[in-house]
Amino acid sequence: MLLPSSRYEFIKGEVANVYKQQNICEFPICATELAEKMGFTIVQYSSLSPYAYGKAIKASSDGFYAERNWKEYIFVNDSKAIGKERKRMTVFHEIGHPVLGHDEYVPDDDIKESEARFFGKYLAAPPTAIHLFTLGSQNGIRTKFDISDKASRIASDYYISWRNKVIRTGLAEYDVTILFQLGVRTDIQLERFIKSVKEGNAYEQ
């Protein structure tokens, strides 16, 4: 489901805030470590009672966010049948719900699900980091950010759109925030970064 462009811009800003507040500067991001650092308790489906497990699976085959007694939880299906990349993305996705001001999981709320899905993808592999480390290479993206083939294809395509936007209008504030976390901080460094984007070259300090 497509969202209004203004909403995508808002979500990117919220992702940048997470990078700044949680001092994210290395990839791949450890999803569970990030969630716990942000105050979430991770609950694996396998730790639930049979009754609770049934309710969890009915709510979502992957995972969901819930708040109980002023505590926040992210429930994750830890079945061996689900790949590690998908489990990581589930955690990123569920972090997105409360960060974006969503209530608890609502199965049929396509807007909230689309917002959290975009949040998770952008958190895992923002295009600024993609340029710094992979120049948009799909194989490089998959390896550096530890995401699936499908997710790396999507990220590579999105990187191209982002690069074209930077060429036209320059960096957005959220780009600068994330770059600061990744060591691109001075005006000279930012100028070099923008030049590398425009020329399609690797960024050099």
Image (cartoon, rainbow, N blue to C red):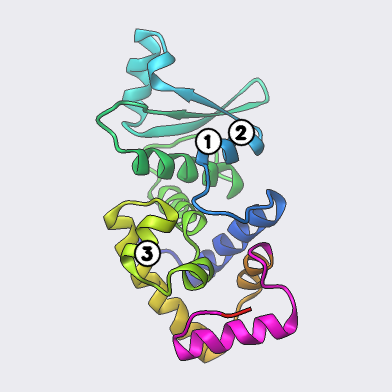
**Quadrant where the image shows the N terminus:** bottom left
Which mark is drawn over residue 36? Answer: 2
| Mark 1, secondary structure of its residue | helix
- Residues packed near mark 2 inside 10 Å, few (<14), some (14 to 19) or many (20 plus): few
Q: How many marks?
A: 3
Q: Nearer the viewer, mark 2 or mark 3?
A: 3
Residue contact between numbered discs 2 and 1, judged by CB atoms under 8 Å = yes
Residue that lies at the very extreme toward the right in this rendered image: 186
Dominant secondary structure of the magenta stretch? helix
Which mark is drawn over residue 84? Answer: none
Q: What's the distance in space between the residues labelled 3 and 1, CA to CA?
A: 23 Å
| Mark 3, secondary structure of its residue | helix
Q: Amino acid at mark 3?
A: Gly
- As for residue 125 lying within the magenta part, the answer is no
Q: Is residue 199 left or right of residue 181?
A: left
- Residues packed near mark 1 inside 10 Å, few (<14), some (14 to 19) or many (20 plus): some
Q: Nearer the viewer, mark 3 or mark 1?
A: 3
Vertical placement of 205 versus 9: above or below?
A: below
Q: Position of residue 3 (x, y in %)?
A: 43, 64
Q: Amino acid at mark 2?
A: Glu
Q: What's the distance in space between the residues labelled 2 and 3, CA to CA?
A: 28 Å
Q: Position of residue 90 (x, y in %)?
A: 42, 40
Vertical placement of 192 versus 64: above or below?
A: below
- Residue identified by numbered label 3: 140
- Residue identified by numbered label 1: 32
Question: Where does the magenta region start and end?
Answer: 181-203
Q: Is residue 151 left or right of residue 70?
A: left
Q: Position of residue 23 (x, y in %)?
A: 69, 52
**Quadrant where the image shows the C terminus:** bottom right
- Corner quadrant of residue 177: bottom right
Vertical placement of 112 versus 140: above or below?
A: above
Q: Earlier in the sequence, mark 2 or mark 3?
A: 2
